[in-house]
Image (cartoon, grey):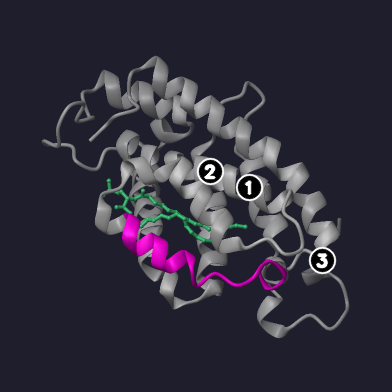
Amino acid sequence: LPCRSIMAGPAAPENQNFCFKDELEAFKLSLSPNKEVIIEHYLAGWNGLVKFLNRLGNVFGFISKDASSKIQILRNFLNSEHGSEYFTVQSMVKYELENNLVDLKKAGSHPESGCRTLLRLHRALRWLELFLERLRTSQEDGKTSVMCADAYNESLAQFHPWVIRKAAGVAFCMLPGRLSFFEAMNVGTPDQVVAMLGEALPVVAEVYQITQDLYAKHDLLDLP
Ligand SMILES: CCCCCCCCCCCCC/C=C/[C@@H](O)[C@H](COP(=O)(O)O)NC(=O)CCCCCCCCCCCCCCC
């Protein structure tokens, strides 16, 4: 499916450098041939989602700021002298655990480890998976705010205190309706959006599951 941004046509100027399909492509690239998750591409995927969120309006700023700061923490590790240890999620987990760089029970001398920071994004990826699946199967009169809230309550909400859940609930109500939301994705007609989601979802689900299994194996799912 060609993106509207690369087709000649009356695309709105603010759409020109954005296409949701390209942004999700990064998650596909993040899967290495031996099914490890390459952090650089994983972060590029998140960066694309944040870009999209920023296009939806300022009310989502507190969400995109938090995501951006976590992306930045991980980028800093990637660009540090130990950057090669952070090539994949697998190598990061191994390196940080072997070198006691993770606060396992309560925040101590390593409150911003790569492992705990990536875990926050990883939990949000489950929200994304559930939300995209709802969008994909939604009817024309479906409400994005409801789909988003349902996906959130089923996943991320359990990790957030009341005040964040409340703020998130308010933000969800400001989401544009299904058609405007699809248009903001800049992928094409609603049918094309649905088809794109059908292709992208298995990839998001696989990246999620690989990370989930790895974290479970090392007992890292509750990092403070
Ligand atoms: C399209 C609507 C977007 C709704 C986004 C849904 C997720 C709602 C998350 C609300 C988070 C509020 C910000 C604060 C979070 C932190 O407290 C909390 C814990 O961090 P800490 O342990 O360091 O303190 N942080 C987190 O859980 C990480 C949240 C990361 C959220 C990333 C959301 C990116 C959203 C991308 C939207 C793309 C939508 C695409 C759909 C086609």
Counting from the top left corner in percent of width and height, residue 222 is at 29, 29
Which residue is labeled 2 in the image?
Answer: 42
Secondary structure at numbered mark 2: helix
Image region (quadrant) for ligand 1: bottom left
The residue sitting at 50% across, 71% down in the picture is: 54
Marks 3 and 2, how far apart at CA: 25 Å
Whether residues under marks 1 and 2 lie with C-beta atoms below 8 angstroms apart, the answer is yes
Taking depth in this image into account, of 134 and 82 the one nearest to the observer is 134
User: Which badge, 1 or 2, comes first in the chain's sequence?
Assistant: 1
Counting from the top left corner in percent of width and height, residue 46 is at 51, 52
Q: State left or right for residue 55 relative to residue 157.
A: right
User: Which badge, 1 or 3, comes first in the chain's sequence?
Assistant: 1
The part of the image, by quadrant, that contains residue 109 is top left
**Residue 31 visible in rendering:** no
Q: Quadrant of the C terminus?
A: top left
User: Which badge, 3 or 2, comes first in the chain's sequence?
Assistant: 2
Marks 1 and 3, how far apart at CA: 19 Å
Which residue is labeled 1 in the image?
Answer: 26
Counting from the top left corner in percent of width and height, residue 77 is at 34, 43
Q: State which region is magenta.
A: 165-181
The residue carrying pointer 1 sits among few (fewer than 14), some (14 to 19) or many (20 or more) residues within 10 Å by Cα, namely: many
Q: Is residue 83 above or below residue 21?
A: above
Q: Quadrant of the N terminus?
A: bottom right
Q: Is residue 12 above or below residue 118?
A: below
The residue carrying pointer 3 sits among few (fewer than 14), some (14 to 19) or many (20 or more) residues within 10 Å by Cα, namely: some
Which is more foreground, mark 1 or mark 3? Answer: 3
Instruction: Give the residue type that dot 3 points to.
Output: Gly
The residue sitting at 52% across, 49% down in the picture is: 150
